[in-house]
Amino acid sequence: MKSLFDQPDRTSLLQRLDKLQADTPRQWGKMNAAQMVTHCARALETGTGDRPMKQKLIGKILMPFFRKSILGEKPFSRNGPTDPSFIVADDREFFTERQKLVDLIAKFVQRGPDAAGKETHAFFGSMTGQEWGETMYKHIDHHLQQFGL
C-alpha cells in the first residue's frame, strides 16, 4: 500500500499537489481547492503532533468492526463523514495553504513512523507509524482525486 513514508509515493503525490490550482474544479463535494488543502493539513497535523486528538466515542465503538476495511487498500468513499474540527467552510488563500500542506508532509516524514505511531487519530485511535503513513497518503490522494488529479 502507498505511504507518505515511501519516497516515490510521496514524490508522485507532491507532483499532483503542485498541479492543483485555486480554480481547479471539484468533481464532487463542497470544498474548493483552498479549503481542501487546509482540510488535509488539519488532518495531517494530528500525525505530526501539532493537533493532539483523543479518539472519539464513535471511533472506539465502530473501529473494531471496520478497522481493516478503512485502513486497507479500499479507497475512501465520496462525501464521507469528517471530524468537525477538520471542516473548512471559510475562504482561504490557496498558495499559502498548499505550501502549509507541503511543509507538513515534510515534517511528518522527517519525524518518521515511530513518532507518528505515538499520535492518536480522532476516529481510528491508536495506529502504527506505517498505518499513519498509509492513511495520510490515502486521505490526500482521495482529495486530489476529488479535483481530478
Image: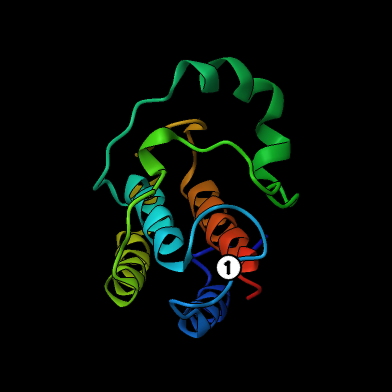
Can residue 6 be seen here? The reply is yes
Q: Residue at x 67, y 65 (%)?
A: 27
129 relative position to 111: left or right = right
Q: Position of residue 34 (x, y in %)?
A: 40, 66
Q: Vertical placement of 60 versus 12: above or below?
A: above
Q: Residue at x 29, y 64 (%)?
A: 107
- Along the line of sight, the residue nearer the viewer: 27 or 5: 27
Q: Residue at x 65, y 32 (%)?
A: 67
- The quadrant of the rendering that contains the N terminus is bottom right
130 relative position to 118: left or right = right
- Along the line of sight, the residue nearer the viewer: 85 or 9: 85
- Along the line of sight, the residue nearer the viewer: 13 or 21: 21
Quarter occupied by residue 99: bottom left
Q: Position of residue 141 (x, y in %)?
A: 59, 64
Q: Residue at x 64, y 45 (%)?
A: 79
Q: Position of residue 100 (x, y in %)?
A: 29, 68
Q: Which residue is mark 1?
A: 144
The local secondary structure at tag 1 comes to helix
Quarter occupied by residue 149: bottom right
Q: Vertical placement of 9 versus 88: above or below?
A: below
